[in-house]
Amino acid sequence: MCSLEPFPLLEHGQYEILNWMIMLGVVGPAVRGNVYAYEPMEASGGGWTVVDMDLEDARERSGALVSEVGRS
């Protein structure tokens, strides 16, 4: 998915997916998000989303996961 070109994505209102992919790469798969709001933007074909990502919880769960892997 990272090889998707920005301009074709922009034409279809899907350019935001690259930002979410970067965020997932930074915080890792253990993070969970709660969507607080979503507002579609018909002009661009996309929308605005407000998400709370609990990084402290993700860090604790990642640490527990690492501990379990180390035991096996």
Image (cartoon, rainbow, N blue to C red):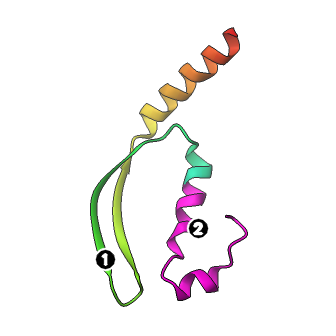
Query: Answer yes or no: do the residues labelled 1 and 2 have beta carbons within 8 Å?
Result: no
Looking at the image, is 60 positioned above or below residue 55?
above
Which quarter shows the C terminus?
A: top right
Mark 2 residue type: Leu
For disc 2, the neighbor class at 10 Å (few under 14, some 14 to 19, many from 20) is: some
Q: Which secondary structure, mark 2?
A: helix
Mark 1 residue type: Pro
Residue visible at 63% across and 86% down?
A: 7
Residue visible at 48% across and 41% down?
A: 31
Q: Main secondary structure of the magenta part?
A: helix
Q: Is residue 26 magenta?
A: no
Looking at the image, is 28 positioned above or below residue 51?
above
Residue visible at 48% across and 34% down?
A: 58
For disc 1, the neighbor class at 10 Å (few under 14, some 14 to 19, many from 20) is: few
Q: Which secondary structure, mark 1?
A: strand
Q: Which residue is mark 2?
A: 18
Q: Image quadrant of residue 47?
A: bottom left
Residue stretch in magenta: 1-23
